[in-house]
Image (cartoon, grey):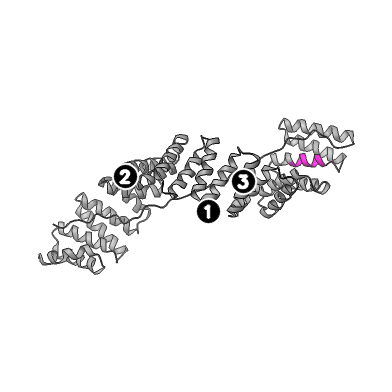
Amino acid sequence: MLKMQNRSILPFSGIMSYLMVAVFVWFSGISLQAQSQIPEAVTAFNEAIAHFNAKAYEKAIISYSKAIELDPAYTKAYYNRGNTRINLEDYKGAIADYNKVINLDAKFAKAWLYKGFAEMKTGETKAALKSFNTALANDRSLDAAFLNRGVIQQKLENYELAIDDYKEVLKLKPSQYTAMYNQGLCYYKLNQYQDAVTSFTEAINHQPAKAELYENRGKSYIKLEKFEEAIADFTAAIKNNASTAEFYYYRGYCKMQIEDLGGANTDFALALQIQPDHDASLTNKAMVSLQLRKYDEAILDYSNLLKKNPKNADYFMNRGLAYLQSEGYDNAAEDFKDAIEIKPAFPEAYFNLANVLTKQEKLAEACEAMKQASKLGYEPANAHINVLCTEK
């Protein structure tokens, strides 16, 4: 009786990182200092402020426009109208207003700041960078300018520059969660995983209910091969958001690494309950099911994978192994033959086909399959050829 080779040659699914960039939105208070010598313009300005505070933004625009009509050099009316337009997501109009402000007062730092934000929203990255640079040249206390400049640098993959900006934010505002979080993402991209852990930990201390913080710290721990710590983080992420398949997948992946195959199998199954098309979970669950000798589960899992990828020789190979171990010899033989058809130089498939054919007492065919496995360099086949090929 030949010893069956129970091999899973499908590698573990790789870690699939999806990292988020948070853009922080901020608005300064509406100035009550009128800055006009025309009483009617001041009245319209104050009416606009009242409308703004009541969130009647369209009416506020009308009143600011009236103030500007009465006093075309009314800097704060242009500035506040720009802020109001941002609330209405009229970014082009806001940029036009901030340009008016800057023409009247080139050192108006907050006008540059908000202009940069509006330019970010319209995709004018270079212009936004220039605006934030100018804002900071006039006032380095503007943490929002550092923050949003960092976001731009991060999107441009200038991670070191982004980190420098986030550090400036945290000097000015030590509790700024977005800067901590994005700094961690940048460190992750730079493969500085311990620094990423530190940044995410600081952010968690300020926002302990944010699932994405535990997720990204967990991913950093995976890179550091600290799987127990990663498992704790994904467990915390699940506690805060139990409906995300990715969290169960990553926790299952970590459990595979510490050989908790039963726990991994459960987590992959939970991920698939939430997201049935989560291919990474299905791939790893199939492999774990096979390793746990849950052959019926493995057969079902690989069958589902083959529906999505019917030309994957490894899937046929592994499903064949599950059939072989559960004594479904006819199905196993078909799967090994399909694997060979897709991948002719597949020595393990020939070897296991020989096992099945031996079980079916088709010794001549088994001999030929074993010879082919040996010919393809699969050493375990060599020990069986003489015995198998003489039993006729």
What x and y, as percent, mark residue 132?
Answer: 70, 49
Q: Are marks 3 and 2 in contact (CB under 8 Å)?
A: no
**x then y, percent, for residue 22:** 58, 44
Under circle 1, the secondary element is loop
What number is the disc on residue 190? 1
- Residue 76 colored in magenta in the image: yes
Pointer 3 residue: 167
Q: Amino acid at mark 2?
A: Leu
Residue toward you, 135 or 280: 135
Give the dominant element type of the magenta stretch: helix, strand or loop.
helix
Are circles 3 and 1 on residues that touch, CB within 8 Å? Answer: no
The part of the chain drawn in magenta is 74-82
| Dot 3: element | helix
Q: Determine which residue is flagged by label 2.
A: 261
* 298 inside magenta stretch: no
Q: Earlier in the sequence, mark 1 or mark 2?
A: 1
